[in-house]
Image: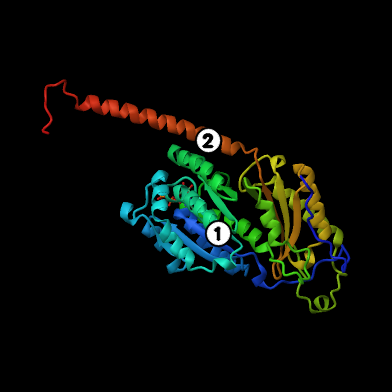
Amino acid sequence: MVPVPHIAVDRSRSIDRPYLEERPRETAMKLALIGFGQAGGKVVDQFLAYDDEIDGGFVESGLAVNTATTDLQGLEHVADENRVCIGQARVNGHGVGADNELGAEVAEADIDEIQHAIDRIPTHEVDAFLVVAGMGGGTGSGGAPVLAKHLKRIYTQPVYGLGILPATDEGGIYTLNAARSFRTFVREVDNLLVFDNDVWRSAGESVEGGYDRINREIVERFGLLFAAGEVGHGDHVAESVVDSSEIINTLSGGGISTIGYATETVETDDGGLFSSFTGSDDDFDDGSATNRLTSLVRKATLGRLTLSCDVSSADRGLVVATGPPRKLNRKGVERGRQWLEDETGSMEIRGGDYPITGGDEVGAIVLLSGVTDIPRIDQLQQVGTEAKETTEEVRASAEDEFASLVDTGGELDALF
Ligand SMILES: Nc1nc2c(ncn2[C@@H]2O[C@H](COP(=O)(O)OP(=O)(O)OP(=O)(O)O)[C@@H](O)[C@H]2O)c(=O)[nH]1
């Protein structure tokens, strides 16, 4: 693989100086988010709230598609006109009851209704589509791959998926649904970003309370990543800031992606009038900033990923340092990037930063793409296959038992 340039070197500044630039919010990469099914809708709802909260500007539009009207009514941030109820003729607004074949059929039948809603958003302003769904149910599990296929046919922008895997104790049908949907979804999108509910559950939490917390983890990780992607305007000074094309290139090539994230609270002196006017970095401890970033990159990579995998199987990667501009330095990002290169053996590791003023946390986001050694997916497929066989056996024996139940040995005739 040809090595890809990562951080453009800005010769006008010393490599050891912190970055002082701020960037206007309208430069972020713009996504059209489409949540399919209940989990998909709720996560998109949270993305919208998070985008507002961090002033990220990465959401161009957020849509929710579902077969259940109550799920759509429960959303808070998705605009009413962006809530699309499909399958009315088949399921009359009641959901598809974890039948993902029906979910796929209904999505295909009503794809025009979804397209009408998409027609109302300014798709020419969109850098990519992100289709979000829980893989274990029926509506999102079946519908998301159908929508991804449709979008890829119509638009030139990349179509990404964000697939949420069910927890292992949800049962056979959810696992089987997820295994089948996963296979299909990964084939239809330009890249499948994965979040595994199983790894993120906490004991003793209610399901709903648990999802609220988990959804927050999801939007923080994926939201920060997309918010970091600045759309280059040529003359922009902050060359060290992650460019949206770096995210797109890391994701392009397809396959499966996972994200790691680690943060550390720092003491900030940002906003000090003197230092911001003079650009003085007297108080900036370059060595400790470098060490902090390098260790955060390690923690993010070796800690809890959205989908556990063998890191060395990653084909491409991206390191993004986030936090107060004065706490970020290029050397730290570069060291972290080099460490990830060694860890993955990949020559295609990009890096950059996402300065966020006002906060007191420095963080590292690590995107690993094209990962192939994922024991969880092997397990999902194996359990899914077993569940399919068991379901077929149970169905066959239930049919036999029912036949013998109503069989009276010719003594009684049916009425007609
Ligand atoms: N992270 C997260 N996962 C969820 C949430 N709600 C449901 N899930 C997961 O998503 C899977 C699918 O559930 P839903 O999204 O409710 O299903 P659906 O797509 O609406 O399909 P039907 O209800 O069968 O019509 C579940 O098995 C859970 O693993 C949520 O709020 N957050």
**Residue tagged by mark 2?**
381
On residue 123, which mark appears?
none
Q: Quadrant of residue 265?
A: bottom right
Residue 89, percent across and down? Answer: 31, 55
On residue 155, which mark appears?
1
Q: Quadrant of residue 279?
A: bottom right
Tell whether circle 2 marks a residue whose Cβ is less than 8 angstroms from ligand 1. Answer: no
Where does the C terminus fall, quadrant-wise? top left
Callout 1: 10 Å neighbours few (<14), some, many (20+)?
few
Q: Which mark is nearer the camera, 2 or 1?
A: 1
In this picture, residue 411 sits left or right of residue 294? left
Quote the CA–CA distance across marks 2 and 1: 31 Å
Residue 228, percent across and down? Answer: 68, 62
Task: Indicate the secondary structure of the residue bearing disc 2.
Answer: helix
How many numbered circles are shown?
2
Q: Nearer the viewer, residue 207 or 98?
A: 98
In this picture, residue 394 sits left or right of residue 21? left
* Mark 2 or mark 1, earlier in chain: 1
Residue 91, percent across and down? Answer: 32, 52
